Image (cartoon, rainbow, N blue to C red):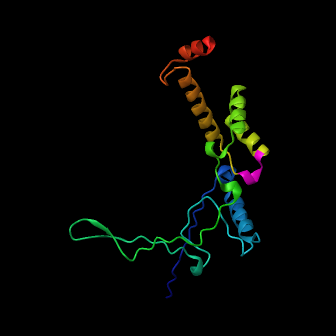
Amino acid sequence: MQSFLSLTHYTFNIWLGTDAMASKDSQRRLIKNNKQRPRDPNVLDVRRTVSTRSPSSDLKCPMQIIIFLGQDDRFYLSTKSCLDHFHHPALKADAILRGHKDMEQGDLDLISLLFSVNATGVQISQIMQSLKGPEAGTYLPKRMYDMNQKTEQLQDLALGLIPGCSDAKKTIAKLEE
């Protein structure tokens, strides 16, 4: 009598958005289409994610920190550690997140003006993307909102209002100005 060993292979994929709601057949088709997509072997796939894999062993970063615990319960850095970094591909321009330090004063004034006319963070980030172009990086809506909040706090501080003041006190101080 022969006995057969049955092996089952499970693949767990992380699907985001509406792809997660697709049927199993649709998900399999999407995976198959993605795998069949032609890729240029000379172009590295640079993303905002962290990976320990390199395209080849020659292009692997030699940085390695070796720490060991001594008999006196203290941690020591080994002399065999290497702190040299090589072969890290540059990020694409649109993968770089832009913020307050990357903007000129005119851009900051525009953001303040747009917030004063009740534009949302998404709308402002889209406006900045269209003005600057994709080579200028990505402007996240949350960063736009945070920059506006920081600007408002500095303006309130210039009026002598501390961050804990009520909205009524802030309104009165702005009207008296």
Provide residue 53's location: percent of width, then percent of height: 56, 72
Residue 35, x across and y down, in percent: 71, 70
Region rendered in magenta: 132-136
| Observer-nearest of 164 and 118 | 164
Task: Look at the picture and state if 53 lies above or below 103.
Answer: below
Q: Residue furthest bottom?
A: 1
Q: Is residue 114 magenta?
A: no
The residue positioned 52% from the left and 20% from the top of the image is: 160
Q: Residue at x 56, y 29 (%)?
A: 154
Q: Position of residue 150 (x, y in %)?
A: 57, 33
For residue 174, what is the image quadrant?
top right
Q: Main secondary structure of the magenta part?
A: helix
Furthest-left residue in this view: 72
Task: Tell me the residue at 72%/62% (across/down).
Answer: 30
* Residue 153, horizontal then vertical, whole percent: 55, 28
67 on left or right of 120: left
Question: In the rendered image of this protein, does residue 106 appear above or below residue 45?
Answer: above
The image shows residue 89, relative to residue 98, as above or below, that is: below
Find residue 48 and report its image quarter: bottom right
Up/down of 79 relative to 113, above or below: below
